[in-house]
Image: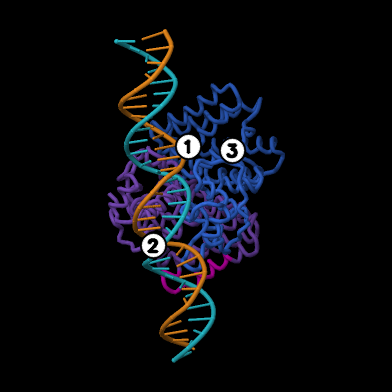
Chain colours: A purple, B blue, C cyan, D orange
Amino acid sequence: MFQTSNVLRRNVHSQVTDRVGGSIVRGEIGIGETLPPEMQICEMMDVSRTVVREAIRTLTGKGLIESRPKSGTRVRPAEQWNQLDPDVLRWHLETSDMDQYLAKLFQLRTAVEPAAAALAAVQASEEDIARIRAGCDGMDAAEINEEFVVADIAFHQAIYFATRNEFFWPIAQMFEITLRQSFAIAATGSHRPRALIEHRAVLDAIAAGDADAARETTVVLLAHSADDLVRIRGREFETTAPRPARKR
Amino acid sequence: MFQTSNVLRRNVHSQVTDRVGGSIVRGEIGIGETLPPEMQICEMMDVSRTVVREAIRTLTGKGLIESRPKSGTRVRPAEQWNQLDPDVLRWHLETSDMDQYLAKLFQLRTAVEPAAAALAAVQASEEDIARIRAGCDGMDAAEINEEFVVADIAFHQAIYFATRNEFFWPIAQMFEITLRQSFAIAATGSHRPRALIEHRAVLDAIAAGDADAARETTVVLLAHSADDLVRIRGREFETTAPRPARKR
DNA sequence: CCGGATTTGTTTTGTCATACATTATGACAA
DNA sequence: TTGTCATAATGTATGACAAAACAAATCCGG
């Protein structure tokens, strides 16, 4: 329990948060179970109670646990965790593999991003559009793979922000984690030109205020990205997306 | 600054969290600005530094602020807040009006819920389906309006949970807040029978494992719900949804 | 003698106060 | 410009006490 992460963090309470949070997400403490009393955790980790309590407050804020005098601090049902929180996400990634994460992320993107693009087409300000365009230009100018991925991610994030609906924003945050974990997701080689064209198509639709076009171009873009992913990672992703113009 | 909320909470640091968090979401502290030093907040609210620090940790955990020695505690860009966090949501609701909240929530639901239903059709376990069915039955058996809304919400939440993709779950959480704030959103009078039929249709599609049917029935259900909302609240909602079978 | 309400006790979190450590920032000096 | 140092803020530790919740023991009426 409370295995030490190899990541060195600035202050002590962040480290404790990391260890306890990791243990919970990893399932070592189980839903509904109570963690050890604060004083015991202090001894286990050789830190003061101040630090332990602040870590507990952080985790409480993320919805992982809840405390009551006498009865102790219990792990809440996973359905109530802030699953999109960067830390929770990171702890998940330390457990489950990248493929599974990417599959789930793609399920979410397939659900949300077309609608987000449509919304952006209606709601985006000049600055929002400039930001999306900057992403495109960045992909264009990218020389190494890493620059390309960074610009790509910035492009997609900008679309979520351009919806002017803050409930879409946490999804954009998730790309940061993806970024840090893997640079191998970029469209490689011959696929890059096509990706660029498709990104421009989305940009143009949003800039023109054409919601339907924005949605459809995004559907195409995501479908091709999924194909690339399958090719790279060698695994089928259960998106259950309405494929753009097929049987149905 | 730090206006006292009329909500009485159990422990002191929750109250401080409420006041400071509210001030930030309300925009009284502005992005990038630093809040007063901890000791000053202590004096302002007449509490110990322990309490203030734990409140700050909570808010840090929700992505609202970040602290550094000497330079102080600054408000982070709203794009990095955990906008789906129940507390953040509540603070938003104390500021912006319910109509605006409902409109944005509906934009999100329109984007996500059809895909979530489709995913659920593929992924749901027997327990998941039983849970969805329980929502339906609850709506059926409901006598007063309040019971109907509770069951309705449980139904939709169950669909998100049935996706077996935890990234969809925080959206289901949002319904709790809606619930607490307003019971006037239910389908009223003559609309209730139709709502029931449409909910059953979604349930049947999911139970049958038919992803396409689940998606389409959900689109219809949401479109009609939106119509009801417009009728009740008297306001047009910008969903930019692909209307089911119309011009386009 | 029994059953239910009440009291008391104990454990754990919640709050306070104080002292000191650490770290960034900005001013001053080389 | 660069380096050093003072300073002001957050970070950490410790010890004490308050409050709450659960459980056991106790009291009292039947």
Mark 1 in CB contact with mark 3 (< 8 angstroms): no
Residue located 50% across and 48% down the image: B13
- Left or right: where B43 falls relative to A180: right
Residue A14 falls inside the magenta stretch: no
Badge 1 amino acid = Ile
Res. A245 in view: no
Protein chain holding label 2: A
Query: What amino acid is at disc 3?
Result: Leu
Comparing B88 with A194, the one in front is B88
Disc 1 on helix, strand or loop?
helix
Residue found 54% across the figure and 37% down from its top: B218
Which amino acid does the dot numbered 2 rest on?
Asn
A189 lies above or below B229: below
* Pointer 3 residue: B222
Highlighted magenta segment, given as a residue range: A131-147
Residue at 47 percent of width and 45 percent of height: B168
Q: Chain of mark 3?
A: B
Residue holding disc 1 = B159
Q: Is residue D6 above or below residue A188?
A: below
Q: Which residue is mark 2?
A: A11
